[in-house]
């Protein structure tokens, strides 16, 4: 699907075709062409009348996994990515949006629905002055909306990490390791998305391209700052989750050691008692303790209790228990 918006004389309208005369620098017209999941026939618009380079067109119709910004002389070509977190699959799915920018037009190409582009498109349809600042400002609006969509997803990650920390320190269970490793996978996915995006927007903020003037470079610098903070947060999350995994493994190990200590004490207490009862259970003559036949059981029981009490006292004196 193709949507074409034309800004002329301070007002914006939609049209059904591109007039090649609008592409001239002195036309006085600003043009935005948005192509959503274009068909092969619709992609011909990129070569005629825009005459974009065949390599840029090839990237525009394909899925490019990494953001980039390239200058083709009379226009700027950029690939940036929107974000869509898939919690069940533990990864941040990205949707690339391709931008062709010149002094008179902006062409956006994306597969399927882009929340950021759809938001700005709705603004253009409601506000006749939406394109009044020019194609570069419109590109900034779209990129800014794309970066704004990162924030809710990062906040959700922060909330999940807080809940994980609470579980680790209040209800440590061995199965928490799986949750921690899944979260670590989410963080790695976020970093793979945000860091290249930051570098690409940073080039626009440094005014490397003539289509972005000084005033707009400040706006792109603000977007770049947001991406820098997101990158720092992703690194901070990575450090926290690594420390949390270490703490969880240490607590599980301590729990296991406590259980093993109790079992070892029980086994140690019963070892001499087992030897004693085994000896008196043998069918051989054994020395009798005072009191006759009826008192032998009580003597053996008293000896067993004395041995157990002595051993427990010794363990406590050594601070083993």
Image: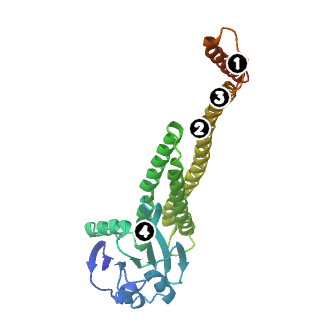
**Secondary structure of the residue carrying numbered label 1:** helix
Q: How many marks?
A: 4
Q: Which residue is mark 2?
A: 255
Left/right of residue 40 with respect to residue 71 in the rendered view = left
Q: Residue at x 49, y 78 (%)?
A: 77
**Near-viewer residue (133 or 219):** 219
Q: Which residue is mark 4?
A: 137
Nearest to viewer (mark 3 / mark 4) = 3
**Secondary structure of the residue carrying numbered label 2:** helix
Cα separation between marks 3 and 4: 82 Å
Q: Is residue 224 visible?
A: no
**Near-viewer residue (106 or 257):** 257
Cα separation between marks 1 and 2: 27 Å
Residue 199 is situated, as x and y percent measured from the top left of the image, at: 57, 66
**Secondary structure of the residue carrying numbered label 4:** helix
Residue 269 is situated, as x and y percent measured from the top left of the image, at: 66, 27
Q: In the rendered view, would you say 171 is above or below 15?
A: above
Q: Which residue is mark 1?
A: 310
**Secondary structure of the residue carrying numbered label 3:** helix
**Placement of the C terminus among the 4 image quadrants:** top right
Q: Are marks 1 and 3 in contact (CB under 8 Å)?
A: no
Q: Are marks 4 and 2 in contact (CB under 8 Å)?
A: no
């Amino acid at each position: 699907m193709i949507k074409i918006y034309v800004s002329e004389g301070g007002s914006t309208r939609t049209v059904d075709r591109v007039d090649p005369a609008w592409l001239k620098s002195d036309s006085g017209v600003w043009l935005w062409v948005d192509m959503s999941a274009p068909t092969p026939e619709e992609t011909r618009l990129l070569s005629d009348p825009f005459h974009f380079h065949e390599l840029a067109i090839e990237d525009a119709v394909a899925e490019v996994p990494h953001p980039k910004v390239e200058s083709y002389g009379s226009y700027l070509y950029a690939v940036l990515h929107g974000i869509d977190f898939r919690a069940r699959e533990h990864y941040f799915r990205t949707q690339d949006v391709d931008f062709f920018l010149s002094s008179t037009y902006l062409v956006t190409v994306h597969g399927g629905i882009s929340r950021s582009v759809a938001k700005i498109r709705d603004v253009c349809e409601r506000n006749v002055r939406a394109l009044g600042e020019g194609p570069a400002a419109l590109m900034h609006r779209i990129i800014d909306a794309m970066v704004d969509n990162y924030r809710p997803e990062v906040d959700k990650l922060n909330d999940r990490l807080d809940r994980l920390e609470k579980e680790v320190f209040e209800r440590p269970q061995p199965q928490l390791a799986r949750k921690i490793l899944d979260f670590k996978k989410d963080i790695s996915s976020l970093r793979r998305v945000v860091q290249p995006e930051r570098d690409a927007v940073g080039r626009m903020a440094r005014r490397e391209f003539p289509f972005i003037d000084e005033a707009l470079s400040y706006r792109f610098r603000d977007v770049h700052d947001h991406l820098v903070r997101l990158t720092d947060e992703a690194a901070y999350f990575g450090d926290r989750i690594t420390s949390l995994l270490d703490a969880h493994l240490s607590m599980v190990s301590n729990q296991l050691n406590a259980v093993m200590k109790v079992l070892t004490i029980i086994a140690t207490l019963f070892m001499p008692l087992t030897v004693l009862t085994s000896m008196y259970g043998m069918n051989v003559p054994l020395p009798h303790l005072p009191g006759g036949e009826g008192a032998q059981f009580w003597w053996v029981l008293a000896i067993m209790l004395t041995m157990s009490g002595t051993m427990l006292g010794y363990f406590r004196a050594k601070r083993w228990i």
